[in-house]
């Protein structure tokens, strides 16, 4: 990702396998990709269309695909932010929201909405639904796959819209764009601030950890694995290997044969994971500003601990939910105030690559 050594100390960079081992591994990954596509085809039956406005999509439309639940407070700003960046249409699955999420989305002319009450965990945390929408509507288009608490930042994003970025990627034969998820947080307890639907979360989530990040390259699919930041510092200090994974591949020129494997942390075929330069050079990358720590975070943590839908082994992360539910203060000596993409590039957290 073009990271500076102080930002991402490389722990391990295993050499690619050769010969019979590589042939066998490639065969297994192709088989896994087909299984994931088959799952997506099967799981599409769990989705009920509410407003399907995909019939008129332009061939070069940039799509944003999401699975949401009870995100009425974030969605007004999220939608407007990514419209300004250049998203043409949003494909959204509402997973049994109990707030105003569905009503809000039904009224948006650039949103196609599906609903389901099926298990988020048993759909591979929404990936089966996401892969289906990408397969059905994303083929040949640039697709941005996000959570509602993520805001995409990329080089020159304040002056160059997404179509400019995707044209540059097309011109350079790049089909996937990597980004690191950067946790933002307030100064003081989470609940000490006010946030209303439509507000800009960056007005209160102004701080982030600029260091404490570790990165490895996973040998199987050659994808990055980044951990660290405020959640590792605060909630997983005794066992940082359990900290959340921060690397993502949110923007892909999609093909119906592609599939996300583990959230957007990795994808198949494996070449989509090549979002960094193993030779020591720089490859263009971005950041996903993570707005999880709004004032509602403590209440939502208690709810999600009860629902047990967000981890394959929910009991293992019970202490994490409990800590978050105590309304913690995340700001500390390691905190820096967020100032924009150029600051993040200077810290080695993202890179312009060759896009000047």
Image (tube, helix red, strand yellow):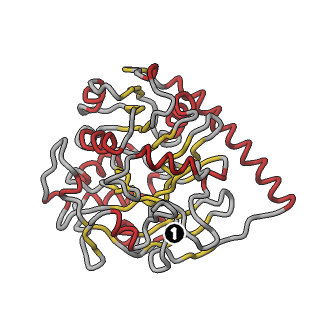
Could you say whether the residue bearing mark 1 is in a helix, strand or loop?
loop
Q: Is residue 7 left or right of residue 99?
A: right
- Image height of 103 relative to 148, above or below: above
Residue 69, x across and y down, in percent:
34, 38
Residue at the image point whose x is 55% and y is 36% from the top: 131
Residue at the image point whose x is 78% and y is 64% from the top: 17
- Image height of 7 relative to 42, above or below: below
Mark 1 closeness class: few <14, some 14–19, many ≥20 residues within 10 Å: many
- Image height of 132 relative to 267, above or below: above
Residue 263, x across and y down, in percent:
51, 48
Q: Nearer the viewer, residue 152 or 293?
A: 152
Q: Is residue 141 left or right of residue 94?
A: right
Q: Nearer the viewer, residue 44 or 4?
A: 4
Residue 167, x across and y down, in percent:
50, 46
Tally the numbered discs.
1
Residue 90, x across and y down, in percent:
39, 33
Q: Is residue 196 left or right of residue 170?
A: left
Image quadrant where one finds the C terminus = bottom left
Quarter location, residue 65: top left
Q: Farthest right residue? A: 20
Q: Is residue 312 left or right of residue 27?
A: left
Residue at the image point whose x is 40% and y is 56% from the top: 154
Residue holding disc 1: 2
């Amino acid at each position: 990702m073009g990271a500076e050594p102080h930002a991402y100390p490389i722990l391990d960079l295993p050499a690619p396998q050769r010969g019979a081992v590589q042939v066998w591994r490639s065969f297994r990954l192709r088989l896994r990709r087909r299984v994931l596509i088959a799952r997506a085809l099967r799981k599409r039956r769990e989705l009920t269309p509410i407003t399907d406005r995909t019939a008129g999509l332009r061939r070069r439309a940039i799509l944003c695909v999401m699975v949401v639940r009870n995100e009425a407070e974030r969605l007004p700003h999220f939608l407007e932010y990514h419209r300004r960046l250049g998203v043409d249409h949003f494909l959204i699955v509402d997973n049994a929201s109990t707030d105003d999420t569905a009503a809000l989305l039904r009224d948006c002319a650039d949103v196609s909405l599906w609903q389901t009450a099926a298990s988020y965990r048993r759909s591979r945390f929404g990936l089966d639904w996401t892969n289906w929408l990408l397969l059905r509507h994303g083929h040949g288009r640039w697709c941005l796959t996000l959570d509602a608490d993520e805001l995409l930042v990329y080089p020159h994003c304040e002056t160059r819209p997404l179509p400019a970025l995707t044209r540059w990627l097309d011109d350079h034969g790049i089909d996937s764009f990597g980004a690191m998820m950067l946790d933002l947080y307030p100064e003081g307890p989470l609940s000490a601030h006010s946030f209303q639907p439509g507000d800009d979360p960056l007005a209160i989530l102004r701080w982030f950890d600029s260091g404490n990040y570790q990165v490895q390259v996973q040998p199987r699919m050659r994808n990055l694995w980044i951990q660290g930041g405020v959640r590792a510092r605060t909630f997983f200090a005794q066992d940082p290997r359990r900290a959340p994974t921060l690397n993502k591949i949110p923007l892909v020129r999609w093909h119906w044969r592609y599939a996300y494997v583990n959230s957007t942390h990795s994808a198949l075929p494996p070449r989509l994971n090549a979002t960094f330069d193993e030779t020591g050079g720089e490859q263009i990358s971005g950041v996903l500003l993570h707005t999880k720590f709004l004032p509602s975070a403590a209440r939502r943590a208690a709810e999600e601990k009860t629902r047990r839908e967000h981890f394959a082994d929910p009991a293992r992360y019970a202490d994490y939910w409990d800590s978050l539910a105590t309304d913690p203060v995340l700001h500390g000596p390691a905190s820096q105030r967020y100032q924009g993409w150029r600051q993040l590039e200077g810290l080695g957290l993202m890179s312009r690559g060759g896009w000047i």
